[in-house]
Image (spheres, grey):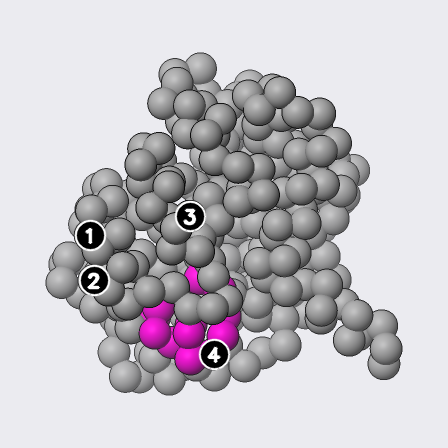
């Protein structure tokens, strides 16, 4: 079964037909999805969804776009959310110098402090990095990634950046852009990264894979990313499906939770 390690079913794009979207995902063989928050309302919504549906899990955090709201009050809110039993990660956090919706100083501060918070709560981090490879790596090397590790979501950097991230203990996650016809550099990175360090994701409703570009993305399309990865790595689709799902389950410690639930 497939695992979508990053989607935004908490986005308003899914508010009218979520159960149909989940049916579609199940039919496509997707057995788990990480619903990722980006501000307080979307983090709370991610938790609500994760409690409503067994196959959903939640991540909470403040995205670099909203980093300007980061401060003691928001931090306390995120800490409360982190204690929820279905919150398996802190994110998405990081730096976005493409849009610069928050001042870069605020972005760096929110990123640093949320990395520290993740370590304190022993949660893996989900990192967003757009056109900020240098500062992202700098902060990661200074603050470090906690023992719980993390993932560089929707990876868009070079082979060297990927290697540096792996050295920090991070997984590399590939999304729809891997399937785009002009994704030559990204394909080369995917060939280099060992399969046991790779996650796959949709980032739905964004980044719809080929051949559905232009339509709303949804978790049922994550197999298209996996199929492309299998082709690039000369592996069977089944092997890619199994390994990437296992990687997600290890990172987010899902099997541990499921065993505990079984015992009760
Ligand atoms: Ni995202």
Circle nearer the N terminus (4, 1): 4
Crowding around mark 4 (Cα neighbors within 10 Å: few <14, some 14 to 19, many 20+) is some
Q: CA distance from mark 4 to mark 2?
A: 20 Å
On screen, residue 123 versus residue 260, left or right, reads left
Give the structural element (helix, strand or loop) at label 1: helix
Q: Nearer the viewer, mark 3 or mark 4?
A: 3
The residue shown at (49%, 26%) is 191
Question: Against 92, is 233 above or below?
Answer: above
Crowding around mark 3 (Cα neighbors within 10 Å: few <14, some 14 to 19, many 20+) is many
What are the residue bounds of the magenta stretch? 114-125
Q: CA distance from mark 3 to mark 4?
A: 22 Å
Asked if labels 2 and 3 touch by Cβ distance under 8 angstroms, the answer is: no
Q: Nearer the viewer, mark 1 or mark 3?
A: 3
How far across and down, in percent of the image, does residue 149 sit?
Answer: 47, 61
* Residue with the mark numbered 3: 166
Examine the image and state in which quarter residue 53 appears. Answer: bottom right
On screen, residue 55 versus residue 94, left or right, reads right
Circle nearer the N terminus (1, 3): 1
Circle nearer the N terminus (2, 1): 2
Question: Against 160, is 96 above or below?
Answer: below
* Residue with the mark numbered 2: 108
Give the structural element (helix, strand or loop) at label 3: helix
* Residue with the mark numbered 1: 135
**In the current view of this chain or complex, which residue is farthest to the top?**
181
Asked if labels 1 and 2 touch by Cβ distance under 8 angstroms, the answer is: yes
Q: CA distance from mark 1 to mark 3?
A: 16 Å
* Residue with the mark numbered 4: 121
């Amino acid at each position: 079964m497939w695992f979508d390690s990053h989607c935004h079913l908490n986005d308003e794009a899914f508010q009218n037909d979520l159960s149909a979207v989940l049916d579609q995902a199940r039919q496509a063989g997707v057995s788990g999805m990480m619903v990722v928050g980006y501000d307080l309302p979307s983090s709370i919504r991610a938790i609500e969804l994760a409690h409503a549906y067994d196959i959903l899990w939640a991540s909470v955090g403040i995205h670099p776009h909203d980093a300007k709201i980061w401060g003691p009050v928001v931090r306390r809110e995120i800490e409360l959310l982190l204690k929820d039993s279905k919150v398996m990660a802190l994110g998405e956090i990081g730096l976005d110098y493409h849009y610069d919706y928050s001042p870069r100083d605020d972005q760096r501060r929110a990123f640093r402090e949320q990395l520290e918070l993740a370590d304190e709560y022993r949660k893996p981090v989900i990192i967003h990095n757009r056109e900020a490879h240098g500062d992202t790596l700098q902060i990661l090397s200074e603050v470090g990634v906690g023992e719980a590790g993390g993932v560089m979501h929707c990876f868009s950097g070079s082979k060297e950046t990927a290697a540096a991230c792996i050295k920090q203990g991070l997984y590399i996650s590939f999304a729809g852009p891997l399937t785009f016809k002009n994704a030559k550099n990204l394909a080369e990175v995917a060939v280099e990264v060992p399969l046991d360090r790779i996650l796959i994701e949709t980032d739905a409703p964004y980044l719809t894979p080929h051949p559905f570009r232009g339509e709303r993305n949804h978790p049922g399309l994550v197999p298209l990313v996996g199929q492309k990865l299998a082709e690039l790595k000369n592996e069977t689709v089944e092997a890619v499906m199994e390994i990437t799902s296992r990687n997600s389950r290890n990172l987010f410690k899902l099997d541990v939770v499921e065993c505990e639930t079984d015992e009760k």
